[in-house]
């Protein structure tokens, strides 16, 4: 194994998704680090990769600079370092970015043995467009911050991909339906590559209703189709605003119309203010 930092992808479910190259890297690296040492040790045992006296160094979000400095010191000594996150590709909603950047800035070789990724597996199964997609990771747990984030990605011209905790799934889907649009096509992929793998394809409102009535467990990926590209005329917006202003305040009317047409709230609000003055 040549000196340098070698990232190693690990299976997201079934252990047989480990690649032969990843096993070669783990077998020959001078130093091994992992987000979860017990998980990687078990994976190596399954595939018959001996540690041969090597200790697996823990490196995760809470390790701090101390663990990173040890790995960088090993690289400076000309040793090969293999790093594996707990499941999937390192750095993809997993630790490793600071280590990768520091190693590259110090002039060390950085490589990867690619493999399983929940993002790509879900895109393959969801039945939504894959020509362009945006991975948004985990949404904020606080409702207001989550809705703000959804507003930011609403108009991105590609399939949206989110990771989500099963405990927050119902609330997140309800917010997605409200902010992104009730009729937007979506898919929920759960426990990918595992025994109870499940894919549900429906509109956001339908998925929100299903999960609210029957919560699920396991690792979840939610995918949402891109927003429609229909053009909206000024007369359509004005007509909708007049109807909304009959029963709502300017702020609420603008909010309703902006959501209905997928427009920026500020733009519609300014238009509603002008109509209110008239």
Image: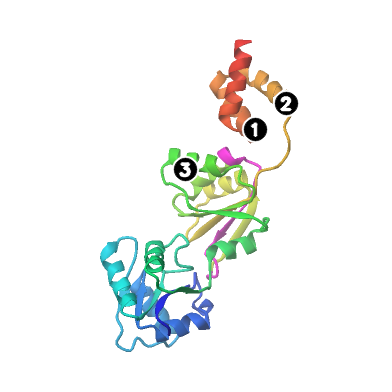
Q: 104 or 254, which lies in front? A: 104
Please identify the residue farthest to the left as the structure is shown: 66
Q: How many dots with numbers?
A: 3
Q: Residue at x 59, y 62 (%)?
A: 122
Left or right: 55 in relation to 246: left
Q: Considering only vertical position in the picture, is 210 above or below 31?
A: above
Which mark identifies residue 260? 1
Q: Residues within 10 Å of mark 2 (few under 14, many from 20)?
A: few
Q: Residue at x 45, y 49 (%)?
A: 168
Which label's residue is closer to the chain start, 3 or 2?
3
Q: Is residue 232 visible?
A: yes
The residue that disc 2 covers is 236
Which label's residue is closer to the chain start, 1 or 3?
3
User: Based on the displayed image, in which of its 4 quarters is residue 125 positioned?
Assistant: bottom right
Q: x%, y% of residue 240?
A: 68, 24
Q: Is residue 191 magenta?
A: yes
The alpha-carbon separation of the residues under discs 1 and 3 comes to: 20 Å
Q: Is residue 10 visible?
A: no
Asked which secondary structure carries label 3, the reply is: helix
User: Based on the displayed image, in which of its 4 quarters is residue 85 positioned?
Assistant: bottom left
Magenta part of the protein: which range?
Answer: 178-195
Q: x%, y% of residue 23?
A: 46, 83
Please identify the residue farthest to the top as the structure is shown: 278
The alpha-carbon separation of the residues under discs 1 and 2 comes to: 11 Å
The residue that disc 3 covers is 146
Asked which secondary structure carries label 1, the reply is: helix
Asked which secondary structure carries label 2, the reply is: helix
Left or right: 103 in relation to 158: left
Q: Residues within 10 Å of mark 3 (few under 14, many from 20)?
A: some
């Amino acid at each position: 194994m040549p000196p340098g930092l070698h990232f190693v992808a690990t299976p997201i479910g079934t252990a047989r998704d480990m690649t032969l190259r990843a096993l070669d890297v783990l077998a020959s690296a001078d130093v091994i680090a992992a987000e979860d040492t017990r998980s990687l040790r078990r994976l190596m045992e399954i595939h018959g990769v001996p540690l041969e006296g090597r200790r697996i160094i823990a490196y995760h979000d809470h390790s701090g600079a101390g663990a990173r400095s040890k790995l960088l010191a090993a690289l400076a000594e000309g040793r090969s370092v293999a790093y594996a996150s707990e499941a999937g590709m390192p750095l993809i909603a997993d630790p490793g970015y600071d280590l990768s950047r520091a190693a590259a800035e110090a002039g060390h070789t950085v490589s990867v043995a690619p493999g399983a990724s929940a993002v790509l597996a879900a895109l393959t199964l969801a039945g939504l467009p894959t020509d362009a997609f945006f991975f948004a990771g985990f949404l904020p747990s606080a409702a207001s911050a989550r809705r703000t984030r959804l507003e930011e990605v609403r108009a991105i011209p590609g399939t949206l991909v989110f990771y989500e905790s099963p405990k927050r799934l119902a609330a997140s889907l309800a917010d997605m339906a409200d902010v992104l649009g009730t009729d937007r096509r979506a898919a929920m992929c759960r426990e990918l590559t595992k025994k109870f793998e499940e894919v549900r394809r429906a509109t956001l409102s339908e998925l929100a209703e299903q999960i609210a009535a029957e919560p699920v467990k396991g690792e979840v990926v939610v995918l949402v189709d891109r927003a429609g590209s229909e053009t909206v005329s000024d007369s359509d917006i004005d007509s909708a605003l007049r109807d909304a202003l009959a029963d709502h305040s300017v702020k609420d009317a603008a909010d309703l119309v902006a959501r209905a047409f997928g427009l920026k709230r500020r733009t519609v609000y300014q238009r509603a203010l002008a109509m209110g003055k008239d």
